[in-house]
Image (cartoon, rainbow, N blue to C red):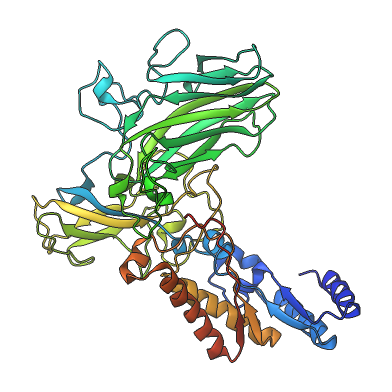
Amino acid sequence: MNQTYIEAMLDRMERSKMNLNLLHNEAFWVVDQPHKPAFEKLNGGPFKQSLMNVSRMHADRRIGLVPHLPPGGYFGGEAFPNAIEGVYLRNQSYKVEGDALLPVAPALPRCNTCSKLHDASTCGACPNNSLTLPFNGDFALAKDEDTPAGWSYEFATDSGNKSTCTTETVPGMGRVVRCDGAPSEKWWSVASDEFQVEADAYHVNALVRTENCSGDGADITMESMEYNGCASGAQLPQPSSEWVNLSFTWECTEVMAKYKIGGPEPHFGNDRGLSQVASGVRLRSTMLSHSGCTWYVAKVSVLRLGSALINVMRTNDTDVHVVDASSGQQFELGRDYQVDNPPMPNQAAVNGNPGGDSPNLMTNYELGSEYRYRLRRLSSGRISDTTRLNVSFDVLPGILGEGGDGHFPVSLAESMVEEYWCDAARAVMTLTRSPAVMASEDEVWGINRDSRAQRLGLSNAELFAHHTNKLQDCVVSIGAEVVLFRFVGCPSR
């Protein structure tokens, strides 16, 4: 904390007759939280002393000090990923094999014969096993000399100059698409043929790089062919001569679209059930540039999150739930089945303590044991060899990989949000002797969608009131007041 800067700022405020200062510092969250290894460097005596010095500076000038502790934003993305509002994957079909509970649908289907990332049902060398996957995502099969099978090139041109796209082999990468953009071209892209998806959420991944590029950079998107608003994507933040992994989470109801293209006006609601997911989608990777440049894309793949068991959220308020698909009988964790965290846990694996502050939880599609959770039945339990199961859980949304969207709204139904916020507020307000605290929540892209919220059965307004009242109860218990500010940055979500 820069005490010299703060003192000079307070002097200017005093001269201007200002009487209130909202002060934000990341270390507010860890003043008395030694269990937070991610920000251990901010914890301890030096910062405490600095904060008390700053508090006296305010008091000497009779300027009120209000600590700023936003429950959303920093809290969700940096402190505890398990507190982020999850993507609710409900009633995923699982089967019993030995003591393992396994998904019926593969997470990342590959052709059993040639091990390529393309749909085995359309590969002559592979058996027809009806996989749902974008065909030829590794560009291994050719439509003609320049174009991969199952894909096409699209251009938008201001003049007669045309961009050119082709495929080439790159050592270590296999077949890649290369496009040389004309200087006058607005954009150019490679798009997959339409393919089918089932009621699930998916994680899309592609590797991209550029040469001599300016403009907005390359992206990868997945868009519905049936429903307006059902599109998500990730964009290269800036031109890069190195391969960059772009990835994002996609589900049609991410924007609550309940209407078909050309149909009635949109209807938004709380139902985030995946029964409304679009059945026909396509992938598109696009380069936007007016200067002309060379752009590459490779290894496009789609991971079925309901089968992958990666980045599963586990807290006291959400976990993996297993029921009998036929009878609806609910099985009990610890009695009928067990959830094994990964040997090398990602941030979401450790209940309540991520052990790191980077939101890059997964940057590739290597589904090795270091990433995956495992479900197994217990021999003393009630799950038989022939039981068909429905498995439901929350997974982390949209922050898997370098191209995540960067927005991490917290789940307003997760108790650790209020508990951790209250601990931090009590520690900071005790040191500063402040009568109030600010709990702003900025750019909340959505609420009331994961299993924790759905279980409460509240409307959006009721859930927000439920969350706000808990914060207020905490502040009252400290003997202070609360200042609340809320901004919904994307109300359609």
Quadrant holding the N terminus:
bottom right
Q: Give the residue drawn at x 33%, y 71%.
A: 456
Q: In the orientation shown, which residue stands out farthest toward the bottom?
A: 479
| 379 left or right, relative to 429 | left
Please give left or right for residue 446 compared with residue 382 in the image.
right
Q: Identify which residue is drawn at 73% across, 78% down.
A: 51
Residue 95, percent from left and from top: 17, 48
Pick the front one: 318 or 158 = 158
Give the image location of residue 414, x and y in percent: 42, 69
Quarter of the figure with residue 230: top left
Q: Can residue 97 be seen in this view?
A: no
Identify the residue at horizontal 30%, vertical 26% (top origin): 119
Say which quarter of the image contains residue 55.
bottom right
- The answer to which image quadrant residue 273 occupies is bottom left
In the figure, 386 relative to 153: above or below? below
Q: In this view, does 485 lie above or below 231?
A: below
Q: Position of residue 204 (x, y in %)?
A: 43, 38
Foreground of the two, 80 or 371: 80
